Amino acid sequence: MKKQWWQEEVVYQIYPKSFYDSNGDGFGDLRGITEKLDYLKDLGVTMLWICPVYQSPMDDNGYDISDYKAIASEFGTMEDLDELILESGKRGIKIILDLVINHTSDEHSWFQQALKDPASPYHDYYIFKEGYQEPNNWRSVFGGSVWEKISERDEYYFHAFGKKQPDLNWENPKLRNEIYEMVNWWLDKGIAGFRVDAITFIKKDLTWDSREPDGVDGLVKCTSASRNQPGIGEFLQELKEKTFDRHECVTVAEAAGVSYDELDQFMGENGYFSMIFDFRYADLDVASGSEWFKRIDWSVKDLNEKIIASQMAIQKYGWSANFIENHDQPRASSKYLRDDQYNPDAIKMLGAMYFFLRGIPFIYQGQELGMHNFQWEKIDEFNDLSSIDQYYRSLEEGFDQKEALHFVNLRSRDNSRTPFPWTKEKYGGFSTHKPWLGMTEEYPSVNAEEQIGKEGSIYEFYKEMIAFRQSGPYKDCLIYGKICPVESSENVIAYKRYTEDETIYCWFNFGNEESVEELEPKNLKQIWSNDKTAQIENHKLRLQPFQALLLKEIEK
Ligand code: NOJ
Ligand code: CA
């Protein structure tokens, strides 16, 4: 691919509500991020993705926007955001914001005017259908019908996500232009680009026909009819031409439902976006991201195959956006490692496995400390809309309360949304006030203060790994090198990064036991590991439990 300025970035994702509370009200805020910029600079990240900070009733923690050009008062002011952009720029850190344009909040003035007056032009900014009952049997991502009745009229509106998140009507050119104007306004402000939310939902099956139910509720997941539908390309192309193409920006799209055959259109050289997230290995433990009760028993081999398939498919056309955590996923150390593997070596090995893949590594706040999932006892302790929905759906599907709670604990989006543990003090030094969401039980021992500067800590490991990729002697190969799989035994993931001049073999042992791997008959030298020395004899590598190892091919 043609070289792009953003290929060398290391992105750190911030969930602002949980990062740092600067004014003691229990909610993280923009000034809190600015206060912690030196921490991020020290870690070595070069770009921040900040989850939505726009005005919002916070039903889905900011993914329900009521004013695209205003900042939520909980998070601060526009001046606070300007200051954050300025201060991060001084430290060589760029900022991308979340762009949520599939839906708004029902409290957005457009929707309020549409409700008040069906003759208003804003009525056609959303999807309304007249009738005495729901127009079809599609189920929303957060549960229940996608249709919500309006109290004053026999009319329903469509929402692919929560009830308070009505979908915008992308068929309406007026609405589209209004969105483009807003996107350009933000890009003109000096941000580096966007993470684009739920973008494959903007086109729907316009027949609105019911489909075969897939649950005991008689409904069917809406994704087959409202995600990546034929014709979506026209909207995405127009969005790109009227906004992103006019700026030197980077975009990474949440584009679930896109097949590997379609990658060229989505993120090839002239694709709609710079990159897209591939969720195939993020969701390997469940049937789908909205069916947590359908657990899937997976093996390291499955994980290996999914990762390699993703890397090879994306390599054909562009650049990957690699991640093992985000604000919708459980903690990686809890998901990808088994219960008896919660040790720092295993967590580091897992971090390195995805970090050295080809593409931009995205690090989610707290991942660099090796945080784990929590274990909550009651459904009322959860805040996340989908956790609550998945709990009741599990009961409806015939599971008992204990089982339902178990599924939710494993998968809850709140797992990654607990306040960031800065210190071992009360409320983890996140706030002086009781935080909006409970801390993890482990915060007195797993926190930033405990790990910064401490030899062998997970934080220091991430810091070193970032520096090694960004400015070490093998930078060129580790960033720009191609990737291909390397034959390995069942608990080991292995791949090769290579350029015309250099080849680096990368090995990661997910097993509790030593594993013996066949090496190609080449001269290899260890260039990096998570602590241990390579044991190589007669072209056999004895990989230690949880060892991560990079070997470079050298001349005789
Ligand atoms: C995906 C976001 O990542 C998630 O947090 C949100 O709930 C939905 N899109 C709806 O905006
Ligand atoms: Ca605050």
Image: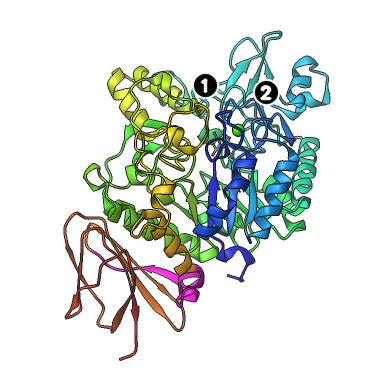
Q: Position of residue 512 (x, y in %)?
A: 19, 54
Q: Position of residue 109 (x, y in %)?
A: 77, 25
Closer to us: 152 or 426: 426
Label 1's element?
loop
Q: Is residue 250 left or right of residue 474?
A: right
According to the image, label 2 marks what residue? Answer: 106
Crowd class of label 2 (few under 14; some 14 to 19; many from 20; radius 10 Å): many
Q: Quadrant of the N terminus?
A: bottom right
Magenta run includes residue 231: no
Magenta run includes residue 473: yes
Question: Which tag is nearer the camera, tag 1 or tag 2?
Answer: 2
Q: Position of residue 86 (x, y in %)?
A: 71, 53
Dot label at residue 137 = 1
Crowd class of label 1 (few under 14; some 14 to 19; many from 20; radius 10 Å): many
Do callouts 1 and 2 mark residues in contact (Cβ within 8 Å)?
A: no
Query: Is residue 308 among what the camera can see?
Result: no
| Earlier-in-chain disc, 1 versus 2 | 2
- Indicate the colouring scheme: rainbow
Mark 2 belongs to which amino acid? Asp
How far apart marks 1 and 2 lie (CA) works out to 22 Å
Segment tinted magenta in the rendering: 470-488
Q: Is residue 16 left or right of residue 214?
A: right
- 149 w.r.t. 348: above or below: above
Mark 1 belongs to which amino acid? Asn
Label 2's element?
loop
